[in-house]
Amino acid sequence: MKHVPKLTFAVLAAVLCGCGGTGGGSPKPTTSLNLNPRVECIVTVQRTNLMHPDEWTDAQLADPTNLQVKADLIDPTVFGVQDPTNIEEGEEMTFQLVNYTAAGQRQILQNVSFQSSDSGSTFGVLASNTGQYVAGASATTQPLFVSATFNGQTFATQYDIKIRQVRVLGTVLDGSNNAADLAGAQVEFFDQSGTLVDTVTVQFDGSFRASVPTITTQFTIFGDSLPDTFYHSFSYGGLQYDANPVGCIPAMPTGLVVGTTILPSTLLVTPRVSGQSTPPSTGCNSGPVVHKKG
């Protein structure tokens, strides 16, 4: 499996529609998550998941930065930002066109028209006026695209529909518990033989929501996706591990089953200090394991 960064990018509407979701692989992104505005995907919050559903407006429920909504959820795992390439069958998401201010404030743009390259709604139904998306009961290995048109400009992102697997929730932060510089980093997952089974993109708040098979045994941050201001290593559960590894990476929780698994510790990436070498790995007792990406 070839490693391809999965990032949001801008394209012309004509190019998007020409893809049809059936091409020979996804176009190579030309921008990073610094693209502004950009299309993002959030988990649609259902009022049945809330303790006090009448206390919240639709706009508040659509804002993944609203921690008061999250605190009011019966099940907080149904809340958050979603890497759209990790949507599973039957899930409900909302695509949004958002802008970030210089201070980092997230603004949801209004009066946006949404369109999917899945024009026949074969794999799900997208509401053109709200961006709400309900995935169908069929997965696809072909890349799909959703576009958002605003003030005559069109932005797009790739999305994929996977079979129901292990939903892995986690967080990537720097040593100060700050997510600002790590959005767009990649978290990779491997099976016991060291073969890459999935890659997920870290979102603006440092969170990631992966969809991986039950055979997944290890994971890591993809070192080349980290900004140069950080070492190609990270701490997890108090131990130090390699990013973009040839050896020392942490193990997944054991006994994975289809459903939601939350990583019990944050992945903390250490800011680089001039003149100092990468911190040594402390989490491995055995020799290197070769990890394969293709």
Image: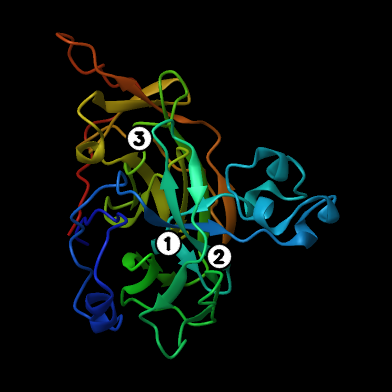
Residue pointed to by mark 2: 93
**Amino acid at the residue labelled 2:** Met
26 and 102: which one is in front?
102
On the image, the x and y values in percent for residue 232 come to 23, 28
On the image, the x and y values in percent for residue 188 come to 33, 48
Residue pointed to by mark 1: 84
Q: Is residue 215 above or below residue 64?
A: below
Cα distance in 3D space between marks 2 and 3: 23 Å
Q: Local crowd at mark 3 within 10 Å, few (<14), some, or many (≥20)?
A: many
Q: Quadrant of the C terminus?
A: bottom left
Mark 1 touching mark 2, by CB under 8 A? Answer: yes
Q: Earlier in the sequence, mark 1 or mark 2?
A: 1
Cα distance in 3D space between marks 3 and 1: 18 Å
Give the quarter of the image for residue 154.
Answer: bottom left
Q: How many marks?
A: 3
Q: Is residue 28 left or right of residue 129?
A: left
Give the structural element (helix, strand or loop) at label 2: strand
**Residue 73 visible in the picture:** yes
**Amino acid at the residue labelled 1:** Pro
Q: Earlier in the sequence, mark 3 or mark 1?
A: 1
Image point (67%, 58%), residue name? 45
Residue pointed to by mark 3: 182
On the image, the x and y values in percent for residue 156 come to 33, 65
Image point (33%, 49%), residue name? 36
